[in-house]
Image (cartoon, rainbow, N blue to C red):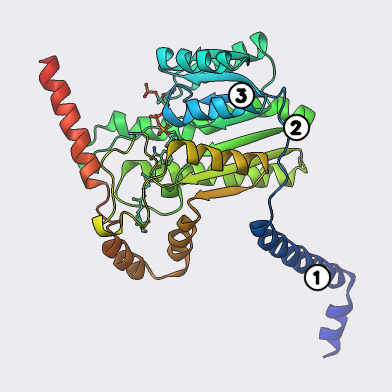
Amino acid sequence: SLLILRLCCSPGTMIVLVDLLLMLIDLTFSILTAVIQTFLRPRLKCIDGELCLITGAGGALGRLFALEFAKEGARLVLWDCNATANERTAELVRELGVEAHAYTVDLSERRSIYQAADRVRAEVGDVSILVNNAGVVAGRRLLDCPDELLERTLLVNCHALFWMTKAFLPQMKAKNHGHIVTIASALGLFSTACDYCASKFGAVGFHESLTHELLAEDLDGIKTTLVCPYIVDTGMFAGCEIRKELKSLIPPLQPLYTVQQSMKAILAEQQMICIPRLMYIPFLSRALLPWEANVATYRFMGGDKCMLPFIKNVEMKSSNGNMKSS
Ligand SMILES: NC(=O)C1=CN([C@@H]2O[C@H](COP(=O)(O)OP(=O)(O)OC[C@H]3O[C@@H](n4cnc5c(N)ncnc54)[C@H](OP(=O)(O)O)[C@@H]3O)[C@@H](O)[C@H]2O)C=CC1
Ligand SMILES: CC1=C(/C=C/C(C)=C/C=C/C(C)=C/C=O)C(C)(C)CCC1
């Protein structure tokens, strides 16, 4: 008992006990703050004059993000592999009287990312808000999916996040000011049968590790936000649906609503947002319930086979394409 007493009173143990106490205070404070913030309208930051880069800006959500950021007064750099769609987004932004610079970039090519990043820095300036929004899905069963398509999903949805961050974080670090937004998916928090899920789990993991790295370096001026939406009615997942009778309980999200909710989270410097909030339930149940219990609820809700009609759509489109080309 003398030994135990001596151990307890040693300076090392005292420091651990004090740290433990401080950690418990921090933990309680952060839980209380999160609960209170759920009911309060958060203070939104001003991004007037900030330089915001959006990837996939020619796509449905990317274009809406561009317009919302423009309304907030941010100057825009727009990246997409689809030059025409991207230029159209730039025109719409300019119609609002806001500066927009469109770049054609293939995010599946690391070199293309680094080259375009050098051009942006030289031609426009330092990016302070980065919205990693571009995403792709193969939409095939694993064994029917060409390797190149599977690889593309991982390159665009996951690898590109590393290269984008490596390209733009140094200037943010130099000023201890910036914001990196990851548009992931509810399917980055729990999965169903689809090539896309692994890439979005990767995106979620990337976001978390980046956030921890910034905190560990005390770079509290650089914020991160993870956005995890359920199906959004943009056409990307046309046909994907849960059990018909339950569809009206969790209808697909409207693109504008999704982007406006995401904007609120970004401007409030919120760490993460699931849209709708209901998506926190399968996220939690995946972590808390046994695997078989999750399988039973997925089966009941039609989450297990939700991708099948979508895959059929993709197959039909590609066979039509083949017929046309032949
Ligand atoms: N729609 C949904 O149900 C949901 C979508 N999300 C995520 O939201 C984000 C936006 O989705 P959404 O707007 O619906 O999708 P879209 O397909 O409408 O937009 C994606 C954009 O990214 C572009 N893009 C694709 N590959 C590359 C590449 N290699 N380099 C550069 N640009 C590329 C696309 O060009 P192109 O059209 O030429 O391929 C397109 O313009 C994605 O990350 C998606 O995963 C998350 C949850 C649900
Ligand atoms: C799997 C699963 C569900 C369905 C989820 C679906 C259909 C998600 C689709 C998301 C998409 C398309 C995201 C794109 O990024 C439920 C019914 C919530 C219950 C829990 C298990």
What quarter of the picture does the C terminus occupy?
top left
Question: What's the residue type where badge 1 is placed?
Answer: Leu
Residue 75 coordinates in the image, percent (x, y)? 65, 19
Q: Ligand 1, what quadrant?
A: top left
The residue at which mark 1 appears reads as 21
121 displayed left or right of 147: right
Residue 166 in sight here? no
What amino acid type should be assigned to the residue bearing mark 3?
Ala
Q: Is residue 280 above or below residue 17?
A: above
Q: Which residue is the site of mark 3?
A: 70
Q: Earlier in the sequence, mark 1 or mark 3?
A: 1
Q: Earlier in the sequence, mark 3 or mark 2?
A: 3
Q: Is residue 191 left or right of residue 112?
A: left
State the CA–CA distance, disc 1 to disc 3. 45 Å
Q: Are marks 1 and 3 in contact (CB under 8 Å)?
A: no
Query: Residue 199's x, y, as percent?
Result: 42, 41
Disc count in the image? 3
> Is the C-beta of the residue carrying label 3 under 8 Å from the nearest atom of ligand 1?
no
Q: Residue at x 38, y 32 (%)?
A: 136
**Mark whose residue sits in front, 1 or 3:** 3
Task: Using a 10 Å C-alpha cutoff, classify the residue at mark 2 as few (fewer than 14 neighbours), some (14 to 19) or many (20 or more).
Answer: some
Q: CA distance from mark 2 to mark 1?
A: 31 Å
Label 2 secondary element: loop
Name which of mark 2 and mark 1 comes first in the sequence.
Answer: 1
Q: Which mark is residue 177?
A: 2
Q: Which x, y percent locates residue 310?
A: 24, 41
Disc 3 secondary structure class: helix
Q: Nearer the viewer, residue 136 or 195?
A: 136
The residue carrying pointer 1 sits among few (fewer than 14), some (14 to 19) or many (20 or more) residues within 10 Å by Cα, namely: few
Badge 3 density bin: few <14, some 14–19, many ≥20, Cα 10 Å: many
Q: Residue at x 54, y 19 (%)?
A: 78
**Residue farthest to the top, as pictured:** 123
